Image (tube, rainbow, N blue to C red):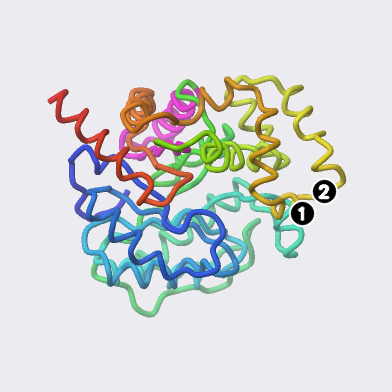
């Protein structure tokens, strides 16, 4: 995914988010990333929100407070920055990290882009933007006219003496996964997929890479797993249930997750019809308190969360992560908790790998 050194220890196959969810104070990102690096994780993922989680600001800070772990922006969006700004941001962060930066993109929610007044990204727009960035980082002068925009003459005045950043794509649907396989260096799968759905997703990525004449194994696939280890039932509902319900309520995303897992679409419709969400649009649903989401999440089919998350004691969660690697994922992104709540799982995962030799 990038040119940075990547350890081969068991823990290096794990990653985590820093500052998961919404935050008022971004400063804990420093200690969270330091803890992840100390535990031996391979990648720290930095999510972007347009309030207190500005991607280049956070990665710029972490570039100077970490020394080994990869730093992946997961994810930003092509419509919120001009390609020259993206190209400059990408190579500046690559230089600051010494070659450890990965620039990630995603489709996001159409409702958000409509409210922002920017185009909803399409497969072609994402693919073309990735191509433009690669050409700019190679020092080329680029003229582009197409669905992504009108850019008559783009060129970086300076380029860096390092390989360009890796490009990552977040995806859940077949078209996005295929795009990741043919045009990106890595794919991060959405949370709430079962190991079986991950295996199918990996197959789509690898197949598209091969069809494009690329080495299928060169495209790194990260399964994202919601983890709540050694938690009381009420805590697990907040960490797992509330977040899962938030995904399922989103138009398009929730439907794609249910389809990917082979779950009952009528059951999803019943949850969305819950009185707590009556008349709420995308923006309003995002503001529903976590406690309310946790309470309503008890209406989800029990097997949905059992099949698609990791709960229980640390050893049980670690074994569950192994299921995702066994399904073909190259790495697992631990989600739902800050790294201090995941240290036990990392230790159990590492110990289990050591026992297997």
* Marker count (numbered): 2
Q: Residue at x 22, y 28 (%)?
A: 352
Task: State yes or no: discs 1 and 2 in contact (Cβ < 8 Å).
Answer: yes
Task: Please state the extent of the stretch shown in magenta in the rendering.
Answer: 197-226
Residue 68: where, in percent of width, then height?
22, 58
Q: Residue at x 41, y 35 (%)?
A: 209
Left or right of residue 4: residue 261: right
Q: Residue at x 33, y 23 (%)?
A: 326
Q: What's the distance in space between the residues labelled 1 and 2, CA to CA?
A: 5 Å
Residue under pointer 2 = 280
The residue most toward the right is: 279
Residue 284 circle label: 1
Residue 113: where, in percent of width, then height?
70, 58
Residue 118: where, in percent of width, then height?
71, 63
Mark 1 Cα within 10 Å, few/some/many (few <14, many 20+)?
Answer: few
Q: Residue at x 82, y 48 (%)?
A: 280
Left or right of residue 270: residue 32: left
**338 in relation to 315, above or below:** below
């Amino acid at each position: 995914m990038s040119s940075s050194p990547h350890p081969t220890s068991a823990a290096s196959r794990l990653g985590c988010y820093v500052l998961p969810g919404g935050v008022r104070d971004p400063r804990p990102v420093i200690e969270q990333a330091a803890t992840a690096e100390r535990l031996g994780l391979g990648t720290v993922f930095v999510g972007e929100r347009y309030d207190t989680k500005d991607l280049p600001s956070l990665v710029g800070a972490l570039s100077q407070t970490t020394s080994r772990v990869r730093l992946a922006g997961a994810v930003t969006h092509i419509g919120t920055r001009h390609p020259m700004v993206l190209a400059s941001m990408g190579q500046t962060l690559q230089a600051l990290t010494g070659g450890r930066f990965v620039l990630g993109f995603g489709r996001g929610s159409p409702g958000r882009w409509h409210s922002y007044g920017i185009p909803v990204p399409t497969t072609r727009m994402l693919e073309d933007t990735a191509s433009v960035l690669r050409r700019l980082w190679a020092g080329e002068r680029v003229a582009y006219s197409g669905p992504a925009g009108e850019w008559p003459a783009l060129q970086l005045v300076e380029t860096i003496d390092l390989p360009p950043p890796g490009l990552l794509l977040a995806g859940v649907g077949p078209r996005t996964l295929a795009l990741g396989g043919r045009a990106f260096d890595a794919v991060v799968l959405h949370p709430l997929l079962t190991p079986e759905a991950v295996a199918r997703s990996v197959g789509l990525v690898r197949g598209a890479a091969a069809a494009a004449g690329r080495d299928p194994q060169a495209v790194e696939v990260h399964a994202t797993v919601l983890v709540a280890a050694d938690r009381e039932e009420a805590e697990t509902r907040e960490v797992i249930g509330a977040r899962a319900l938030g995904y399922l309520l989103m138009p398009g995303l929730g439907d794609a997750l249910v389809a990917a897992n082979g779950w009952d679409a009528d059951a999803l419709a019943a949850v969305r019809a819950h009185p707590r969400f009556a008349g709420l649009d995308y923006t309003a649903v995002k503001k529903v308190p976590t406690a309310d989401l946790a309470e309503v999440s008890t209406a989800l089919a029990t097997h949905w969360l059992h099949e698609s998350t990791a709960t229980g004691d640390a050893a049980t969660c670690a074994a569950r992560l192994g299921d995702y690697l066994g399904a073909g994922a190259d790495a697992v992104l631990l989600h739902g908790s800050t790294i201090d709540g995941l240290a036990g799982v990392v230790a159990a995962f590492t110990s289990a790998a050591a026992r297997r030799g």
